[in-house]
């Protein structure tokens, strides 16, 4: 793997990280002690601002009041949109439409509630796709910070449109604790409310430490958007955010991650820790040759110091056996490698290169249809990117 403009073998790092993760699981284990948060230092929401349930069992708080993460811009048309309002009419119509889907958008909060319920309203009646379940397309996903490790504890299964209401977790140990709620990957989110018992407190989560405050920005295709994760927290962008304890911005646009020049100008506005460009599955080889260099050079001019990570096309899984399928991605990867070498020769600094061979694995189990990732595929995707991104952050 190429890191920091030099050829570097990162396999040992992957093994070390994996072993560390396994050791942490063995030491802590399911049901281990959860680290509590000092809630006194946090900004609490006023119960008077909440809506009382008809039976009085819950107070419903607007998720926007807790702060919405996973966005690069504040001037959005709607709190759960991914692009600024000014982008409408500037980016292609398909990109704008997809930007209204809430992939990677999340809400962090702290509560001492014994149970947590969520009521969320969708913008589309299409709850699922023929290769992706409703839990990933239109569901919500809850994690808890367990002594520094984010653990999944509940998923909201959408059963109807537009509004669903679910209890995501109950019997929560005496708190308070920090939680993370991911919103739908392929549906849009109109509103989100958190329901907790009246006696419980709800607060905004503490800020990220200064060295982890800048987000990693991912720009790419349907895979980056989350196709086809079983639930919102399983897309690799979110996995990496939890592992690296930093925010992430998911700018995946199904079928439309094509390095349009106007989109490069937009993402250059975001002060990111790194830009991860993963667009090849939506581009032809000639597009790669035509667009990568000017896109990267413009981004580098706007952001001279921010690392830029170029990601090769995934191995289409049938390509291990079918020659034509293999050539379909290899020709694009050759074009990207050539563009990368020309950028280095031109003296463009801060470039990093991730080969595609390790992204999904080679057993065919990492993809639903040979292209879009299963949860296993997303875990492998995160494993491949983590050593590069961790080195850039640290």
Image (cartoon, helix red, strand yellow):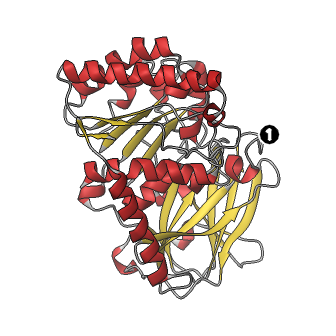
Q: Answer with left or right where residue 165 lies relative to residue 143.
A: right
Q: Nearer the viewer, residue 332 or 65?
A: 332
Q: Quadrant of the N terminus?
A: top left
Residue at point 74%, 39% (across, down): 124
Q: Which of 285 and 146 is in front in this view?
A: 285
Residue at point 65%, 41% (across, down): 186
Residue ID for mark 1: 130
Where is residue 156, by image quadrant?
bottom right
List the single residue furthest toward the left: 347
**Where does residue 77 sit, x and y in percent of width and height?**
52, 35
Q: Is residue 224 above or below residue 42?
A: above
Q: Specify few, some or many for label 1: CA neighbours under 10 Å numbering under 14, 14-19, or 20 or more.
A: few
**Where does residue 272 sit, x and y in percent of width and height?**
31, 42
Residue at point 43%, 76% (across, down): 24
Q: Quadrant of the C terminus?
A: bottom left
Q: Answer with left or right where residue 170 lies relative to residue 160.
A: left
**Where does residue 283 sit, x and y in percent of width and height?**
52, 20
**Where does residue 390 sit, x and y in percent of width and height?**
31, 53
Residue at point 65%, 68% (across, down): 154
């Amino acid at each position: 793997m190429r890191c920091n403009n030099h050829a570097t073998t990162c396999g040992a790092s992957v093994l070390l990280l994996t072993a560390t993760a396994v050791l942490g699981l063995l030491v802590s284990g399911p049901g281990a002690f959860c680290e509590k948060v000092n809630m006194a230092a946090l900004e609490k929401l006023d119960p008077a601002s909440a809506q009382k349930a008809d039976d009085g069992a819950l107070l419903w708080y607007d998720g926007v009041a807790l702060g919405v993460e996973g966005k690069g811009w504040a001037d959005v048309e709607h709190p759960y949109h991914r692009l600024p309002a000014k982008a409408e009419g500037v980016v292609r119509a398909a990109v704008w439409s997809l930007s209204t889907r809430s992939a990677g958008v999340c809400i962090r909060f702290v509560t001492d509630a014994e149970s947590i319920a969520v009521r969320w309203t969708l913008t589309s009646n299409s709850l699922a796709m023929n290769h992706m379940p409703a839990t990933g397309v239109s569901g919500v996903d809850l994690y808890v910070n367990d002594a520094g490790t984010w653990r999944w504890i509940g998923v909201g299964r959408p059963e109807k449109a537009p509004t669903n209401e679910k209890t995501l977790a109950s019997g929560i140990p005496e708190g308070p604790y920090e939680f993370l709620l991911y919103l739908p990957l392929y549906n849009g989110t109109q509103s989100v409310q958190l329901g907790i018992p009246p006696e419980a407190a709800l607060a905004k989560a503490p800020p990220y430490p200064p060295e982890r405050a800048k987000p990693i920005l991912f720009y790419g295709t349907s895979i980056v958007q989350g196709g086809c994760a079983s639930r919102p927290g399983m897309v690799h962008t979110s996995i990496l955010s939890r592992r690296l304890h930093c925010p992430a911005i998911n700018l995946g646009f199904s079928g439309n991650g094509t390095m349009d020049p106007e989109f490069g100008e937009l993402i250059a506005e975001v002060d990111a820790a790194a830009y991860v460009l993963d667009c090849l599955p939506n581009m032809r080889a000639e597009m790669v040759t035509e667009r990568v260099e000017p896109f990267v050079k413009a981004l580098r001019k706007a952001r001279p110091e921010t690392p830029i990570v170029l990601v090769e096309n995934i191995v289409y899984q049938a390509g291990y056996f079918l020659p034509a399928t293999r050539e379909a991605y290899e020709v694009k990867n050759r074009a990207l490698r050539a563009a990368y070498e020309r950028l280095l020769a031109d003296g463009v600094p801060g470039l990093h290169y991730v080969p595609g061979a390790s992204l999904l694995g080679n057993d065919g189990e990492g993809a639903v249809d040979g292209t879009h990732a299963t949860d296993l595929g997303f875990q492998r995707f995160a494993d491949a990117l983590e050593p590069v991104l961790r080195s850039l952050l640290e």
